[in-house]
Image (tube, grey):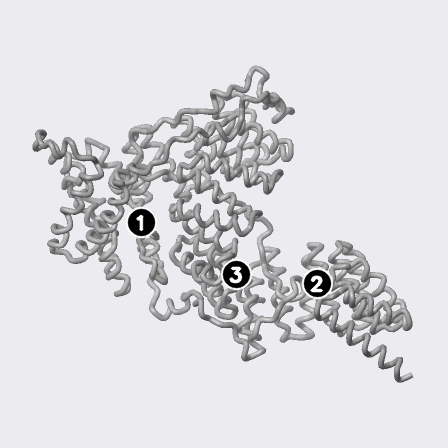
Amino acid sequence: MEDKELSVKLKKDRAAAAVLSRDYELATQLYTQLLSSDPENKELLFALGNLYERSGNNREAIPVYKKIVALDGQNVNALNSLGSIYRRLGKYNESIAVLEQAVIADEKDMQSFYNLGFTYRSMEKYDYAIKSFKIVIESKPDDVLAYNHLGAIYAIKNEQKKAISTFLMGLTIDPNHPVLHLNLAKSYEAIGNVQKAKQEYEATLRSNPGWLEAIDSYADLLISTGELKNASDLVTKSLNLHSDDSGLHTKMGQVYYFQEEFSSAETEFTEAVKFDSKNKKAFSFLAESYEKNGKLEQALQTMQQYEEAYPSDSEMLRQYASILLSNGKFNSASRKIKELYDKEPDSIQTLSLLSQYFICRGNDEKLSKCLSKIQKKSPNDLKYKLDMAKRYEQMEAYSKAETQLKEYLLSNPNDRDAEAFLASIYEKEGRLENALSLYQKLSADSENELKDSPVLTEEENVAGETLSSDSEPDTENPENAIPELPAEDEGEIVTEKTEELSELEAIEPRSDADLINNLIDSAREESEFNVNDIFDDTQNTKQINSFVPEEDLSLENSEKIDNSDEKVEQKTDSFAFSGSLILDAEKMLEKNEKSISPVQVAFEKSIPLATNVFYVKQEMPKLNTASEKFAKEKELFCKLKELAEFLPPEKKEEFHKSKYYMLLDYLIARFSLKKGLLSVANEFAHLDKSNKMLENASILSLTKETFSSMQDYIKSLNDPYTATALLKENTDLLAKMPTLEK
């Protein structure tokens, strides 16, 4: 008798050890052997059912738990396990039935109400879920996780104030709970309280340093508020610890993308795809970065890879079609649009692409029918007009682009990007006074934003410090340590159901800085490529006749596929000062900067807008004759310069040594109608037309000679700040030139 008991104990121990080592097959064999001699042993049955759940064999666990319930109808643990399995299998009614049976068996067992809450939430019966978690909190007022789940359901219902109140109550019990802090941050973000959202993201990362989900969400917020340098610092520190994380490389690429550092963005997105060949966001942004950088062939190749990874994905098809339209490959684009239309004929985005196609084809009749359908389905959403304006601009139909933008702005008067787009259209139409007026409005808005921005004290900035890479989780105190939370039963994170990628349409900048850079970059320009090599449009392609059959929006039979239209000549504008004079503000800051105050953010945003005013005025002969005509703009830049004096001491010193200081002095001088560099250089070139050195020298050698001779002059400048900034730029440029001459 003793030998048999010893044998049973040894098998139990071996089975338990096999479970711990995840040798589920051996554990199953051992428990099955034990049950063969004791088939109604509830302890063994429960161990076997739990083993099936652990190994993902939920269906095999059901009869095991049912047998326990048949033996003991009051077994709450078995009923709860059955309820959880039914929920995971999508059998919600069965789940509710057994869980209610568990409540009847023991109404004091709060796990039954937890599971009821989870099931009702999965059924989207949120009010019932809320009642379930409230019962838990009434019974156990110190149950932190119940507060988290209740708050998460309020957030899903978009009752953010209730969600915030609930998360805060949970934090009074456990002030360092990272999941509560993260969900609270997302709720604050949802109601537009950016400052509190940032504080909660910081609290999350103090509680759980290096938590990638929190870093990802926080970086998104910083990007959306224009704090690209802070976002860069946050993601860079994480990349130092997780260099092979595809998501972090994607986020770093987004930072570079919105800084318009497209080459650096390409590098990061390429790394992201290398570590995760299914990273949709990386593929999408990589293609856009190539397109923004003028690398059309690479953009199309990336879209091909994206399509191979997600051949039927609607977002991929929409982006692919848009890029093909932008590149003048209308036939290839039409095939993608047809594929989309076959899948989702009532989608506004698909109909918008179809309308863009008809614009590019010049088919006004079908365009009108397509727009009529869009307006019937979504009369209040005018985003499609922005895409139409882009296509009209592409086809150089500027007056039609203007009309679409004005109609869009009637309903969206605060969209500054759309206003800047409209100003650029005015420029291309030669309506410079209209462009000037709009740029001045944008500059004034930016200046008002600057005035209204609060200045953070040193104490307030302490709360804004991002996590340090050497932070460690609190492993000494088990109460503060972060448990390994099961996905559905513990740390529920509030997530958005959908995330749409907005396609940003940037306008390439043209400036004095660009002209200088072009002299240097001209030596390494790549040879022209033929985007027609990407697609073979010479094959026989079936005619597309059924885009919108019920309203006859299909392509006519007479609209034969003509390969010649796949190579559209894109004309260059003689006047293209629609972009900023300078690089984005964030690019000007040194890499060791750790935080940016709201004053700095607004200050940086105001400069690019104001420079557009300068360039438009420069193109207006009537206004370029007297300095008083520039008085307001000159005063604006003087105020910007004065405002920098209110920056913290270390920031002020850094500003004085940066390109900003130099740039503002330059613009103030130009608004005073002092001659610019190119004008002076042009006059100098005409002083001595017999100068053989000028006649025979290469552009690069002249550039190098000029920059070298400038160094002594720069050092002699009275203003040490300007001298420091200029000398740094001069030295950096000279360092690049010898390589270019080889």
Near-viewer residue (161 or 660): 660
Q: Amino acid at mark 2?
A: Gly
Q: Is residue 401 visible?
A: no
669 vs 363: above or below: below
Q: Residue, x 58% and y 28% (percent of image)?
A: 335
Q: Residue furthest front?
A: 742
Near-viewer residue (119 or 381): 119
* Residue 374: percent from left, percent from top: 56, 32
* Residue 603: percent from left, percent from top: 31, 53
- Quarter of the rendering containing residue 739: top left
Which label was assigned to residue 690? none
Q: CA distance from mark 3 to mark 1?
A: 33 Å
Q: Is 522 placed left or right of 534 in the picture?
A: left
What residue is pinned by disc 3?
212
Q: Residue, x 75% and y 54% (percent of image)?
A: 90
Q: Is residue 241 visible?
A: yes
What is the crowding at mark 1: few (fewer than 14 residues within 10 Å), some, or many (at least 20)?
Answer: many
Which label was assigned to residue 606? 1
